[in-house]
Image: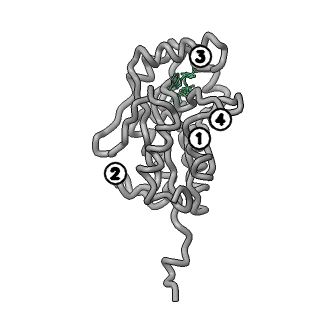
């Protein structure tokens, strides 16, 4: 007879695609003429939910960024907490979820890791919230954001790229995989699924 552990649903896994504005979290992978994010492609491949962090910003935060003023930690906290709650919701139901969020600093990622109710600060390995960081040179990022702003496609101005790059920090102890943001989005998605295959709840097996 199955023991209680076997009757419990698999715990879900949250995979956060992170990095500075313009790194390609919302890459230009065109699918049926729609712009798809790496995280959205990941969600589709896994058959799980998708959370786009930009959708969780208050209008005040968006207006501030549009004016070329970087957000402060105080501006970001309620936004990060709402993302944490969205992650907690999915993991609480035993579901996987793909998230697109800059998550530039360790402190910001710690808020998101609290989406795993069992998370103990610093136990990165056992946390059900994982991060994959897209990285490209400052020149590549600036060029992408300038082009995107010129196309009138996004509220984030190129003038904020420097502040984004200055904030980005990853602690080696976190064990975050840093991915070359100039490779095609589908390759990033495939590598990410391979990396987390064992930990994913019910999909991509
Ligand atoms: N692999 C790529 N090769 C070439 N251009 C890319 C690539 N990935 C993204 N871009 C382009 O770079 C620009 C910025 O990318 P994107 O909007 O995905 O960034 P982002 O990380 O989602 O930024 P933000 O956090 O500001 O939303 C877009 O115009 C996109 O088309
Ligand atoms: O923490 C931040 O400074 C912001 O969240 C930005 O990263 C934006 O969300 C994003 O880059 C614009 O789309």
The CB of the residue at mark 2 lies under 8 Å from ligand 2: no
- The alpha-carbon separation of the residues under discs 3 and 1 comes to 20 Å
Q: Give the residue displayed 44% in from the left and 50% down from the top.
A: 194
- On the image, numbered disc 1 is attached to which residue? 41
In this rendering, the answer to whether 145 lies above or below 12 is: above
- The alpha-carbon separation of the residues under discs 3 and 2 comes to 37 Å
Mark 1 vs mark 2: in front:
1
- On the image, numbered disc 3 is attached to which residue? 148
Residue 119 lies in quadrant: bottom left
Residue 99 lies in quadrant: top right
- The alpha-carbon separation of the residues under discs 2 and 4 comes to 28 Å
- The alpha-carbon separation of the residues under discs 1 and 4 comes to 17 Å
- On the image, numbered disc 2 is attached to which residue? 122
In primary-sequence order, the first of circles 3 and 2 is 2
Label 2 packing within 10 angstroms: few (<14), some (14-19), many (20+): few
Q: Does the CB distance between marks 1 and 4 fall below 8 Å?
A: no
- The alpha-carbon separation of the residues under discs 1 and 2 comes to 29 Å
Q: How is the image coloured?
A: one colour
Mark 3 vs mark 2: in front:
3
Mark 2 vs mark 4: in front:
4
Mark drawn on residue 102: none
Label 3 SS:
helix
- On the image, numbered disc 4 is attached to which residue? 55
Label 1 SS:
helix
In primary-sequence order, the first of circles 1 and 2 is 1
In this rendering, the answer to whether 151 lies above or below 31 is: above
Q: Is residue 74 visible?
A: no
Label 2 SS:
loop
Q: Does the CB distance between marks 3 and 4 fall below 8 Å?
A: no
In this rendering, the answer to whether 162 lies above or below 105 is: above
Q: Give the residue displayed 50% in from the left and 17% down from the top.
A: 160
The CB of the residue at mark 3 lies under 8 Å from ligand 1: yes
């Amino acid at each position: 007879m199955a023991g209680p552990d076997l009757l419990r649903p698999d715990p879900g896994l949250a995979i956060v695609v992170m990095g500075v504005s313009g790194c390609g979290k919302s890459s230009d992978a065109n699918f049926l003429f729609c712009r798809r994010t790496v995280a959205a492609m990941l969600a589709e491949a896994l058959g799980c939910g998708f959370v786009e962090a930009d959708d969780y910003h208050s209008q005040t935060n968006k207006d501030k960024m549009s004016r070329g003023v970087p957000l402060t930690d105080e501006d970001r906290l309620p936004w990060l907490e709402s993302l944490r709650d969205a992650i907690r919701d999915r993991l609480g139901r035993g579901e996987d979820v793909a998230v697109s969020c800059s998550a530039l600093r360790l402190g910001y990622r710690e808020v998101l890791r609290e989406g795993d109710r069992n998370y103990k600060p610093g136990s990165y390995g056992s946390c059900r919230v994982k991060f994959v960081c897209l990285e490209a040179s400052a020149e590549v990022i600036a060029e992408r954001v300038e082009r995107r702003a010129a196309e009138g496609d996004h509220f984030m101005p190129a003038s904020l790229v420097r502040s984004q790059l200055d904030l980005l920090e990853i602690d080696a102890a976190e064990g975050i995989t840093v991915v070359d943001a100039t490779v095609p989005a589908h390759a990033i998605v495939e590598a990410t699924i391979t990396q987390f295959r064992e930990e994913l709840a019910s999909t991509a097996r």
